[in-house]
């Protein structure tokens, strides 16, 4: 197993926050070749680590790992209540017209092509994303994404649905938005929540490498 150094953003007796690199699973996948993941790397040095949320393998950025059952329970309730505030940074194909806006498109698993997701107004689960364009240059836009819900691949499908797929997206980008890029240009750069034990407001930021 590949035990690279962890990029620790925050650590105390209740909570660990790590900047997950792109291309690393959050939790183990199926098969012996998919056991190298963030939680397994963390368990070596922090054996009480638990999983409360995940990032896609292709997405980099902040992941919280509770360090005891009480923290896991408290943070789980915050995620379920949608009081955890998250912001992602993405580079998307093309110059977006609007400076900001919202996407409200229900999503469902595309079972014949899983793990892909797709928009489905009949059986899809409600999915909302707010966005803000911060830069337009050289045929792409740098966008801040604020997920209201937390569906699988939500940000990736919503950007594709707007006609602006995230650069380097193996599942959803067309060839011009995929070929030149070695990774998915999506990064979880900000998270705000209440400390699971003290209730103190915690804000963590980690800028993208792109």
Image (cartoon, helix red, strand yellow):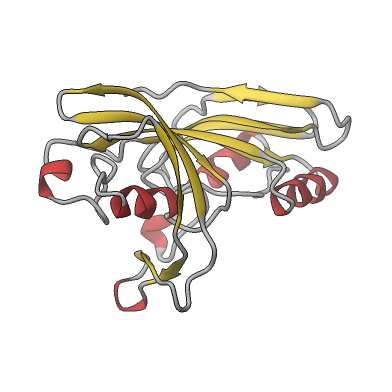
Q: How many marks?
A: 0
92 left or right of 86 in image: left
Percent across and percent down for residue 148 are: 58, 47
195 left or right of 146 in image: right
**Vertical order, 14 against 108 (above or below):** above
Percent across and percent down for residue 120 are: 40, 71
Q: Quadrant of the N terminus?
A: top left
Percent across and percent down for residue 73 are: 81, 51
Residue 167 visible to an observer of this rendering: yes
Residue for point 58% across, 36% down: 86
Viewer-proximal residue among 65 and 125: 125
Viewer-proximal residue among 187 and 85: 85
Residue for point 36% across, 77% down: 111
Residue 11 visible to an observer of this rendering: no
In the rendered image, which quarter is residue 179 located in? top left
In the rendered image, which quarter is residue 44 located in? top right
Percent across and percent down for residue 83 are: 72, 42
**Vertical order, 156 against 59 (above or below):** below
174 left or right of 61 in image: left
Residue for point 59% across, 38% down: 42
List the single residue furthest toward the front.
98
Q: Quadrant of the C terminus?
A: top left
List the single residue furthest toward the right.
198
Residue for point 54% across, 63% down: 126
Viewer-proximal residue among 68 and 62: 62
């Amino acid at each position: 197993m590949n035990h690279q150094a962890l990029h620790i953003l925050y650590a105390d007796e209740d909570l660990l926050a790590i900047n997950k690199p792109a291309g690393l699973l959050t939790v183990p996948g199926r098969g012996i070749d998919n056991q190298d993941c963030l939680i397994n790397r963390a368990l070596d040095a922090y054996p009480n680590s638990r999983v409360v949320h995940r990032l896609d393998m292709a997405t980099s950025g902040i992941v919280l790992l509770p360090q005891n059952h009480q923290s896991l329970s408290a943070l789980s309730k915050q995620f379920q209540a949608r009081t955890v505030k998250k912001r992602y940074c993405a580079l998307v194909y093309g110059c977006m017209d609007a400076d900001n806006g919202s996407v409200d498109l229900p999503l469902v698993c595309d079972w014949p092509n899983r793990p892909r997701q797709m928009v489905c107004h009949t059986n899809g689960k409600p999915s909302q994303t707010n966005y803000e364009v911060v830069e337009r240059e050289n045929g792409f836009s740098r966008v801040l994404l604020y997920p209201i819900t937390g569906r699988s691949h939500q940000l990736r499908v919503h950007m594709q649905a707007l006609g602006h797929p995230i650069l380097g997206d193996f599942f959803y980008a067309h060839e011009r938005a995929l070929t030149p890029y070695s990774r998915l240009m999506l990064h979880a750069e900000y998270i705000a929540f209440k400390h699971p034990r003290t209730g103190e407001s915690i804000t963590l930021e980690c800028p993208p490498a792109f």
